[in-house]
Amino acid sequence: MEFFLQQTVNGLTLGSVYALLALGYSMVYGILKLLNFAHGEVYMFGAFAGYGVLTVLGGASAPLVPIWLMILLMFLAAIVVSSTIGVTLERFAYRPLRNSTRIAPLISAVGASFFLQAAALLLFTANSRTYDAPKLIAIQTGIPIGPIRVWMVRVLVIVTSFTLMILLTLWVNRTRTGKAVRAVSYDREAAAMMGIDVDKVIVVTFLIGSALAGVGGVMVGLVFGRVFHLMGFVAGLKAFTAAVVGGIGSIPGAMFGGLLIGFAEAYTTGYLSSTFQNLIVFGLLIVVLLVRPRGLFGRQELVKV
Amino acid sequence: MSQIGVDQWVEQSDERRDRYSGWTAPARRAFDKLPTGWKLAVLLGAVAVYPLLVPQGEIRIGITVLLLAMLALGLNVVVGWAGLLDLGFVAFYGFGAYFYAIVASDQLPAHWPTWIAIPIIVAASALLGALLSLPSRRLVGDYLAIMTLFFAQIFVELVRNFGRLPFVSEDLDLTGGPNGIPGVEAWDLFGFQINSFKRHYYLLLILTVVLIAGLHNLNASRTGRAWRALREDTLAAEHMTTPVNKLKLLAFVVGAAIAGLAGSIFAAVQVGVFPNNFALPFLITIYAAVILGGSGSISGVVLGAVAIGYIPDA
Amino acid sequence: MSDEMSDSAALLTLSDINTFYGQIHILQDISMEIRIGELVCLLGGNASGKSTTLKTILGIVSPRSGTIEFDGADVTEKSTSFRIAQGMAIVPENRRLFAPMTVLENLEMGAYLRDDDHSEDLEQVYQLFPLLADRKGQLAGTLSGGEQQMVAMGRALMSRPKLLLMDEPSMGLAPILVEQSFEIIQQVHEAGVSILVVEQNANMALSIADHGYVLATGRIVLADTAEVLTEHEGLKKAYLGR
């Protein structure tokens, strides 16, 4: 029971990070029908931005500012860096191709992903860095839940993620811009006919999706410690899986998918072996697609005859 | 007033259309003006004497180009003709390569004769293609792309981590894990060893020419037309009683068989196979060749492969 | 009727518009005019360029040559949002509602560019279509065709437009609903909104229009008052089925 609970907390932690990342994939797909393969790299740069702030402010062992401020600044830096990269990608890698064939932006996305990986390799070298988070947030502090103790870092990650997801849901359902995002993702041309500035809405979508990815990057750094230039690839692929399993384009779907993938991975690692985790996750995707071709929350697209 | 009711749109549709797309379009339009016999003679002559004129090491580029051309031709069947966005294509290439490496090295050890190994590999690749086409009955557009992409990821994952079959034998590492399989043997066609760059080049050249001829006929056939109908409007094609599922299956099978064959040659050329040979970046290279050349056209994708194949080494 | 109209100023003027899709020449030297308070119809068959004309007016596609003047200003180079902010609104072909959004949200999207309070306009729309007030929380995709037409009209009216563009309002509606729909168009017109109706259903459109233009393969082949067009022999043969 204790072990199961521990794995559940692991799954919840991982899952909320995947969910944040999956939201970016899903929102961008919803609005552009584009699989933004560079999203994982946006997340990686967010993680490095957090690392940069941490290092500049004295590192985990001798922080120059209070811990809470440090963590806040790390998140802010990640949001700024990631959303800048995301918006730049949209402007230069995707917008020029918006009216070309379906496959061209896909290739451009993969190219952008490699480009960002190479850039990170040049900037940060191939060595992985560590946040040294246990020094930042004492490992002993935690909240007891039944027989186990949940570390503060994990509590922080889970609470922050869920707060962000709730805020995003409110934003999309209650605000004018949020509704415009939904309108554009349902029917871009009709939205333009209402006077909605589609380009602006797309930029906002990239901005929010990338900011969430940046936050996710810092979270992974805090929980798992290690950040490195290739971290975006596998995480990106997993988050992408989550988005697809949930039904790509659907915001609640991305959240649910993220958590599902997180749990699947945690239980596989816990009860089977970590060698199987990728296989199980990718297999899960194929099974879900075979049973529900548009994912769990996906809606039937209009077919124009 | 005479214009009312007359559909000039349809009448003028030919004038309004540009037949070629992609980067190579002007070159292809110019080439079109040559008489057919001349065209073939010019091309075949040039590529046949190429290895005689360049140093040994340079032939390697020719091999890369021809392999890429074969793959681009195969992918073109799936993507360019049938319009199925297959992002798992590179897995068939890997499958062919690994299959050949396993049956023609000290890995098992097995040393199958080439004339037995190759037909089996091609058939097995085709079968795998048929298998992958099954989900395509239900999945459309991007979802098919996603599914096939993950098929490719799983392939790499499998050869990298699951070479040791857990229930068969603990000692036997079928795929060699991250280290791959070294020491793959050369093709041996009834005593004739394909063991130099030059011989590989000519083998690939012959296969490519045969492939082009075969695909040319296929494209002109009823199946080719049906594929195009499928690509342009699956729904309409289905309503005109085109056997949509059979055609999708056939496209996947043809593409996979070609990729498997190319893979088995690649394994021999490289004298080994490694998981990273078949990862995402190479898939993008093949796609680049198809798109750059102009998806859908045989001559286009071959030209695209030539252009792309030269770049990394130049 | 056309005589008193000719006194009023032009609201929308297209001069020598040429629009291309890639290499394909769609609109050829289109010139037309809608005066303030007029109801104009643009007739034409499939692929005659009707929808492209609308998209050019709205700025969704830009013409290669020619000018578009709206409400006294040259808007040829302006964005769609600018034109809508200036007073254009459209009821698109097939209505194009945001199906996964509620009726109220759809109406709000119509007023997207307005920062001021639009509860009054919402009231007006509900007055015009009382049914929508009851259905405001329902998802637009679950409404019937006739109800969707009401939402689409209401959505366009939410921006308080000077010029209402209607793309094939009769498309996909039962005959009784077509008639209803045109009655509503007339009602809106009488309330002082200038309207451009693009239609294949020439009979219906001409019955409520002041002026009409006929498009064929991207050119305007006829332009006259609705009365004259209704009696035009060639048009009768080609469109009116008489």
Image: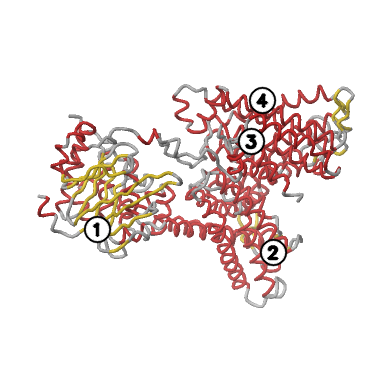
Label 3 vs label 1, nearer the camera:
3
Q: Quadrant of residue B192?
A: top right
| Mark 4–mark 3 distance (CA, rounded to whole Å) | 13 Å
Q: Quadrant of residue A135?
A: bottom right
Do marks 3 and 1 both belong to one polypeptide chain?
no
For residue A125, side relative to residue A185 (left or right): right
Badge 1: residue crowd in 10 Å (few <14, some 14–19, many ≥20):
some
Residue visible at 71% across and 30% down in the picture: B209
In the rendered image, which residue does mark 2 sit on? A139
Mark 2 touching mark 1, by CB under 8 A? no
Which chain does the numbered disc 4 sit on?
B
Under mark 4, the amino acid is: Gly
In the rendered image, which residue does mark 4 sit on? B214
Badge 4: residue crowd in 10 Å (few <14, some 14–19, many ≥20):
few
Label 2 vs label 4, nearer the camera:
4
Do marks 3 and 2 both belong to one polypeptide chain?
no
| Mark 2–mark 1 distance (CA, rounded to whole Å) | 61 Å
Badge 2: residue crowd in 10 Å (few <14, some 14–19, many ≥20):
few
Q: Residue B81: x and y, percent?
A: 57, 32
Do marks 1 and 4 both belong to one polypeptide chain?
no
In the rendered image, which residue does mark 3 sit on? B299
Q: Residue B76: x and y, percent?
A: 62, 35
Label 3 vs label 2, nearer the camera:
3
Under mark 2, the amino acid is: Ile
Do marks 2 and 4 both belong to one polypeptide chain?
no
Do marks 4 and 3 both belong to one polypeptide chain?
yes
| Mark 2–mark 4 distance (CA, rounded to whole Å) | 67 Å
Could you say whether the residue bearing mark 1 is in a helix, strand or loop? loop
Could you say whether the residue bearing mark 2 is in a helix, strand or loop? loop
